[in-house]
């Protein structure tokens, strides 16, 4: 029996005495809070996202589909990357201008093998402007959670405006809670008791976000 089955079994036992007619949690909770703070155009929403990403020390770039391959190649070169992790369905055109060795996401890859890869390039499920947060859901253009945690450098491509929302409630409406969600607000960082900031503790030390315009 797996740990997952053990946990789910305990949940089922804990809920065994709940009457079947009880209101669903989603219906029982009053949700009268603001869904978004103020009206914004798509351009203003993406500008707010870029501003808040920068506040979290992410480096933000803007380009279109034609300029994306050259931009990604430049970012990997400037980082000194010799290898890059590639999710299974990352658009092939994105890395066509880069000569960096591609390492494909495989279930058999160990954490030690992934840790030796310099960078990772992924897509995004949704980006939240008000919080400067990127959400990955394990879709084929994003790969499994661990490939975004092991390399020291993560480049995340966000399609603007399609994947950008203003607020957290708007983001939750787009996400499937059954999927493995990874929420990213800037590079991995922590502070000790004296507030000395240390980056790269439990994830990438460097986060670069490409806002990809056009459709």
Image (tube, rainbow, N blue to C red):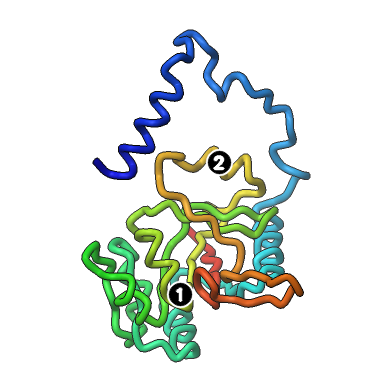
Relative to residue 25, is residue 128 depicted above or below?
Answer: below
At 38% from the left and 67% from the top, the residue drawn is 147
> Residue 26, how many percent across, how many down?
56, 25
The residue carrying pointer 2 sits among few (fewer than 14), some (14 to 19) or many (20 or more) residues within 10 Å by Cα, namely few
> Residue 192, how many percent across, how many down?
69, 72
Residue 2 located left or right of residue 162: left
Q: Which residue is mark 1?
A: 68
Residue 171 located left or right of residue 52: left
The residue carrying pointer 1 sits among few (fewer than 14), some (14 to 19) or many (20 or more) residues within 10 Å by Cα, namely many
Residue 106 located left or right of residue 62: left
At 66% from the left and 60% from the top, the residue drawn is 49
From the viewer's side, name the closer residue of 42 and 200.
200
From the viewer's side, name the closer residue of 87 and 162.
87
From the viewer's side, name the closer residue of 193 and 49.
193
At 61% from the left and 72% from the top, the residue drawn is 58
Query: Which image quarter: residue 144?
Result: bottom left
At 28% from the left and 67% from the top, the residue drawn is 105
Quarter holding the N terminus is top left
Q: Which residue is mark 2?
A: 172
Relative to residue 188, is residue 75 depicted above or below?
Answer: below
Please tell me the numbered disc located at residue 127: none
> Residue 63, how many percent across, how many down?
54, 72
From the viewer's side, name the closer residue of 108 and 130.
108
Residue projecting furthest to the left: 108
Under circle 1, the secondary element is helix
């Amino acid at each position: 029996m797996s740990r997952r089955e053990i946990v789910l079994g305990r949940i089922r036992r804990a809920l065994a005495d709940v009457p079947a007619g009880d209101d669903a949690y989603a219906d029982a909770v009053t949700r009268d809070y603001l869904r978004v703070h103020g009206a914004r155009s798509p351009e203003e929403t993406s500008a707010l996202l870029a501003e808040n990403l920068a506040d979290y020390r992410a480096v933000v770039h803007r380009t279109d589909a034609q300029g994306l391959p050259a931009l990604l190649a430049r970012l990997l070169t400037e980082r000194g990357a010799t290898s890059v992790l590639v999710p299974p369905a990352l658009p092939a055109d994105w890395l066509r201008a880069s000569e960096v060795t591609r390492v494909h996401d495989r279930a058999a890859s160990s954490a030690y093998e992934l840790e030796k890869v310099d960078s990772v390039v992924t897509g995004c499920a949704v980006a939240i402007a008000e919080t400067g947060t990127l959400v990955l859901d394990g879709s084929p253009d994003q790969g499994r959670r661990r490939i975004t945690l092991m390399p020291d450098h993560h480049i995340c491509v966000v399609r603007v405006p399609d994947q950008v929302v203003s607020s957290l409630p708007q983001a939750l409406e787009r996400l499937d809670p059954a999927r493995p969600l990874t929420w990213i607000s800037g590079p991995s960082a922590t502070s000790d008791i004296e507030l000395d900031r240390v980056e790269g503790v439990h994830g990438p030390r460097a986060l670069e976000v490409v806002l990809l315009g056009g459709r």
